[in-house]
Image (tube, rainbow, N blue to C red):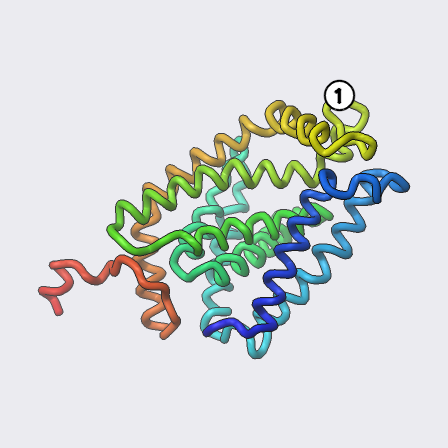
Amino acid sequence: MKPSKLELIGIIVLNILGLAAFFWPFTVPAAVKVMDARTASWWIFLILLLLPLGLLLFVELGRGGMGPKAIALIGVLGAAMVALRIPGFVLGFNAMFIIVLVAGNAFGPRFGFLLGAVGMFASGLFVGGLGPWLPFQMVATAWMGMGAGLLPRSGSWPVRIGALAVYGFVTGLLFGAVMNLYSWPFEANGSGLSWSPDATTAENLGNYWTFYLVRSLGWDMFRAIGNVVMVLILARPLLGSLDRAARRMNLEVRSGPNPLNTPAIRRLA
């Protein structure tokens, strides 16, 4: 089902607000001189992310949105994300990201965006990860799924899976980079790497880059490598299963390599 104009506008607005919520330390520091960074993050949580994200999910998953079959599939895949997240993160890596990568690639950017947001929210409920960081995690994971849906699916399986593996590596690093933006203004407060409303954009960027290298790059590298390993091992059978499920449910699937179009299957047919 193609999205309505209202749904497209909602997704675009939420992405713009998400960018503003993550990158405000580099764009509007003078506007928050009157409040400390932690207070500013709470206002961002309440105004820029929580309300529009909730409204978008209500529109998409409610009546007139993606449809009951797509919603059911998001529920199943979201439950898989919960199950894979429960064991926890191992040095920054968690297996749940493979679901977002393959489902986004199979069903497109809109589906990947919603699955990332819904799956992260549900997993946050189950593991007790509730807090002002959760909407930021939802948006970051939604971006991961949306980007996977924008990857080309034409060509051979090695090309498709290779592109997804490279994308998984890059987004494994980017996920940590953008999530650190949420906490950096108040976690590094008072240090030489802290955010300052009086600093220039270039100075704050330099401080954040050093902060990220020291605090997060090692953990994010494990996530990036883990994503690559999971894609190389599991992507083809998972994508084949998603394509078959979509055909049985009469869902619209993007064109790409057909797992049923093999010599063995054609002989059976």
Q: Nearer the viewer, residue 47 or 201?
A: 201
Going by the numbered disc 1, the residue's amino acid type is: Gly
Q: Quadrant of residue 267?
A: bottom left
Can residue 128 be seen here? The reply is: no
Residue 241 horizontal/vertical position (percent) = 32, 59
Q: Nearer the viewer, residue 225 or 26?
A: 26
Crowding at dot 1, Cα within 10 Å, few <14 / some 14-19 / many 20+, comes out as: few
Residue at horizontal 72 percent and vertical 27 percent from the top: 203
Q: Secondary structure at mark 1?
A: loop
- Outermost residue toward the right? 34
Which residue has dot 1 on it?
192
Q: Residue 259, relative to residue 65: is it above or below?
A: above
| Relative to 172, 166 lies left or right | left
- Outermost residue toward the bottom? 64
Q: Residue 78, relative to residue 61: is it above or below?
A: above
Give the number of marks.
1
- Outermost residue toward the top? 192
Residue 227 horizontal/vertical position (percent) = 43, 40
Q: Residue 214, relative to residue 85: is it above or below?
A: above
Q: Which part of the image, by quadrant, shows the C terminus?
A: bottom left
Residue 212 horizontal/vertical position (percent) = 62, 29
Residue 172 horizontal/vertical position (percent) = 50, 39
Residue at horizontal 48 percent and vertical 51 percent from the top: 147
| Relative to 24, 209 lies left or right | left
